[in-house]
Image (spheres, grey):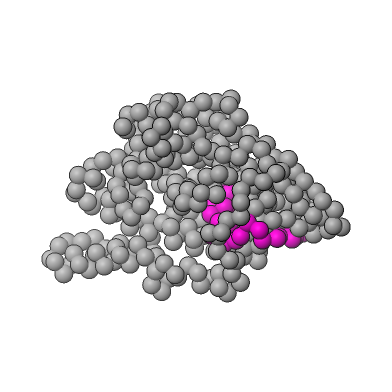
Amino acid sequence: MEILSGAKSLKKKRNSSVNRKRYNKSGIKGIPAVCVILTMLVCCGIMAGCSVDTVPVSDTQTAYQGEADSTDTASSQEEGYLSKDICVIPKKKNIATDAAITADAALLIDDTRNKALYAQNIYASEYPASVSKIATALMTFKYAKFDDTVTISYNASHVTEPGARLCGFKEGDKISVKDLLYGMMVYSGNDAAVALAEHISGSETDFAAEMNQEMVAIGASGTHFVNASGLHDDQHYTTAYDLYLIFHELLKYDDFKELLQCTKYTAEWTDAQGKKQSLDITSTDPYLTGSRQAPKPLTVIGGKSGTTIKAGSCLIMYSQDKKNRDYISVILKADSSYSMYTQMNHMLEYVKRGK
């Protein structure tokens, strides 16, 4: 069942040597462009006789946050601070409290106007569970093509963690990147995530290393991933703010927005014996199935949830209001799925307050 056309905007998959070089394209000698800009600003301030606190160029997120904290313009007194095309939230704005929001971290951003409407513990390290898959999706959109054919490896077909959700691929199966992406995002198949990682980088270990470099390049420096799926590892963590940055990048792809809205999809592939196989995928997103409604004037376009014992219940969502303004919202470590969605709806009420 076709849902998307091939993504012409996707870059060709590079070989491993080129993959390792690609992170230098947006900066100078491996330094992200925004860090170079901030360094120039610091130099200009010193030459002008101003007292300027230097910022380590290797920590883009800290640079953004420091820029927001030290700015005296009226915009910095608002809920968010505009730097490039993202919302930067000073520490003094990361202290929201609401008795109805009991999750470890919560964030709501007006992504059209770059305003933070609610920010609670957004820089705290948290386990993201399957919400991690949005980072794997970003790598896929940037460095693979929908019509690439992937051969399922032994590793991808032998994800053995108890309770891990699997599409059920077998070693030697041949399947498109597009079907793997839908299997990973809509069905939350961990085997699909491993297959995509190996296709892009050769191994899941190399993929995690390259993905971490990509995270730093977009400013998500509070993130460290060790796998493509989000299966628990104590060294696999992120922050609510970093997840916003990742999702913000993904929403630049129209095909990703269409994927988020998918309620049913049929993934098709050929097994090692040449026989056709398929998997009917149905979304369990309560906003898409109609079992939950977002508070007016919002419509939920879609999102990604994840749950493990240590991560709790986690969710990131993309919504729009009647004026087609975009909103990104994050809940991390709620104590149950029901509580997570209840808290999310409560937080979305802040949209009305931010008008």
Image check: 24 left or right of 141?
left
The answer to whether residue 27 is above or below residue 313 is below
The reply to whether residue 110 is in sight is yes
**Which quadrant would residue 198 be assigned to in this image?**
bottom right
Specify the segment rendered in magenta.
132-155
Residue at position x 69%, y 56% in the image:
176
Image check: 62 left or right of 3?
left
The answer to whether residue 336 is above or below residue 184 is above
Residue at position x 19%, y 48% in the image:
73
Residue at position x 74%, y 61% in the image:
151
**Which quadrant would residue 327 be assigned to in this image?**
top left
Report the front residue among 155 and 15.
Answer: 15
**Which quadrant would residue 289 be assigned to in this image?**
top right
Report the front residue among 10 and 329.
Answer: 10
Residue at position x 44%, y 61% in the image:
217
Rendering coords of residue 227 (x, y %): 61, 55
The reply to whether residue 31 is in sight is no
Q: Quadrant of the C terminus?
A: top left
Please, which residue is most extreme toward the right here?
A: 273
Rendering coords of residue 59 (x, y %): 38, 60
Q: Is residue 175 magenta?
A: no
Rendering coords of residue 222 (x, y %): 44, 53
Report the front residue among 80 and 209.
Answer: 80
Q: Quadrant of the N terminus?
A: top right
Rendering coords of residue 163 (x, y %): 70, 41
